[in-house]
Amino acid sequence: MSSTWVPNVSAESPFSLANIPFGIISTPSDPAPHAAVAIGSHVLDLKVLATDDKFTEAFPALVDEEKVFSEPDLNAFAALGRGVHRNVRRAIQQLLSAETTYPEALRDNNELRQKALLPQRSVKMHLPMRIGDYTDFYAGYHHAYAVGSMFRGPQHALQPNYTHLPVGYHGRASSIVVSGTPIRRPNGQILLDPAAEVKQPITGPSRRIDIELELGCIIAKPNRMGSPIKVTDAEDHIFGYVLLNDWSARDIQTWEYVPLGPFNSKNFATTISPWVVLADALEPFRTRAIENKTALQDYLKEGREDTVFDIELEVDIRTPEGDTTTISQTSSRNLMWSFPQMIAHHSLGGCPMNTGDLLGSGTISGPVPRESGSLLELSKGGKEDIMLYGMDVRRFLKDGDTITIRGSCGKPGQRVGFGECIGRIETALPL
């Protein structure tokens, strides 16, 4: 991959020329949300670029489709399919390359460049997709085993179905927010004394707000109701990936989840990163998933071993006093189930997957405590302190705490990353 002529692209930037993630921005000159891509510390405004007379020469895949970049979300672009995504990404890489064969299209077009190439700090980011449905899976093996061991012991940590199918539940799309959106501490029913013979809950603010470090997958190509997606075809239905924080109220969850699973403990907020990393950008970072020794049903057999990605992930917590501590570092390779398997299972009964639908991987944790993707694991179920900078401690989140998730892969100068997925806890509303 060659270098770019765009100024000030750091070798450590997650938005190298090898990446080209898509997002939705608004600018001081155009407050209507519309499409852009990230390159270094800049954004390329695709709505502005599409107004140029030579746009279709550089982007033949978008002839008669130029308006997709004026839409307030990326759904219309995503629906065009992975072949178009690939061609458009390559065309943008060619425009931004130091060795571009179209210098007059942008690099040497001073008027257009000043309008279209903007500092990231000058734009506002929005949710990249119109998300109609959200399903959260439980594909992180080490998280499932650690949490199961806390409540059922190591011998019964995993439910009998865990290695046979990708376990998931239906989440709440209406409370998915873009990075930087404040997160209100939820109120709910809580059982203060789980050991009491008579179970009597109270209603109040959650005392155990947690995070879940996840990878999110966005659907591009839909399927018809009644027509399952084959696992070998599922890649063609994927638009790209985001970082995802599935905020969780553990005390509310403990009381409510039997027998139908999480409800109010999960539906108050889910944060995603603003930039969608296209599926093609992550292809060089494929690796093997965690070994599953169970014989799989035929519809889940992918026919390849490199079914997940090796993305370096980390979680920071910043206290209200401004002190920051990295509390977890792990990799997205710690999944037992791949997104194509999740899609194949999700649609097995004929469920229609629509453009913009979001799938969460489930909490990604590694095999050792410092690689845990939740405070529940880091604090051993709330029994041990997590040491922070300045001798501060946490077991769960306090009001004013800010969580930042980052993820990237690749070598310096060619890094492919997501930017940041940020949320700050605000005080619960009084009842």
Image (cartoon, rainbow, N blue to C red):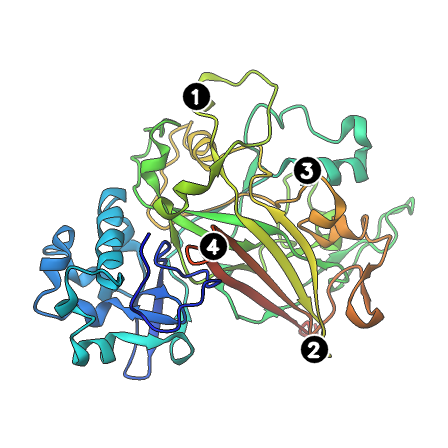
Which residue is at the front of the view, 214 or 259? Answer: 214
Q: Which residue is mark 1?
A: 299
Q: What amino acid is labelled 4 in the image? A: Ala
How dense is the environment of label 2, judged by Cα within 10 Å: few (below 14), some, or many (20 and up)?
few
Which residue is at the front of the view, 29 or 185? Answer: 29
Spatial CA span between label 4 and label 2: 32 Å
Q: Which residue is mark 2?
A: 322
Sequence order check, earlier mark of 4 and 1: 4
- In the rendered image of this protein, does residue 6 appear above or below residue 20? below
Residue 33: give x, y in percent of width and height: 32, 71
Q: Residue at x 55, y 38 (%)?
A: 168
Question: Can residue 255 be seen?
Answer: no
Spatial CA span between label 1 and label 3: 24 Å
Q: Quadrant of residue 395?
A: bottom right
How dense is the environment of label 4, judged by Cα within 10 Å: few (below 14), some, or many (20 and up)?
some
Spatial CA span between label 3 and label 2: 31 Å
Classify mark 1: helix, strand or loop: helix
In the displayed image of the protein, which residue is found farthest to the bottom? 28
Residue 424: give x, y in percent of width and height: 62, 70
The circle drawn on residue 142 is 3
Left/right placement of residue 209 relative to residue 416 reads right
How dense is the environment of label 1, judged by Cα within 10 Å: few (below 14), some, or many (20 and up)?
some
Give the number of the mark in front: 4 or 1.
1
Spatial CA span between label 3 and label 4: 26 Å
Q: Which residue is mark 4?
A: 173
- In the rendered image of this protein, does residue 248 appear above or below residue 426? above
Q: What amino acid is labelled 1 in the image? A: Tyr
Spatial CA span between label 1 and label 2: 50 Å
Residue 252: give x, y in percent of width and height: 72, 54
Sequence order check, earlier mark of 3 and 4: 3
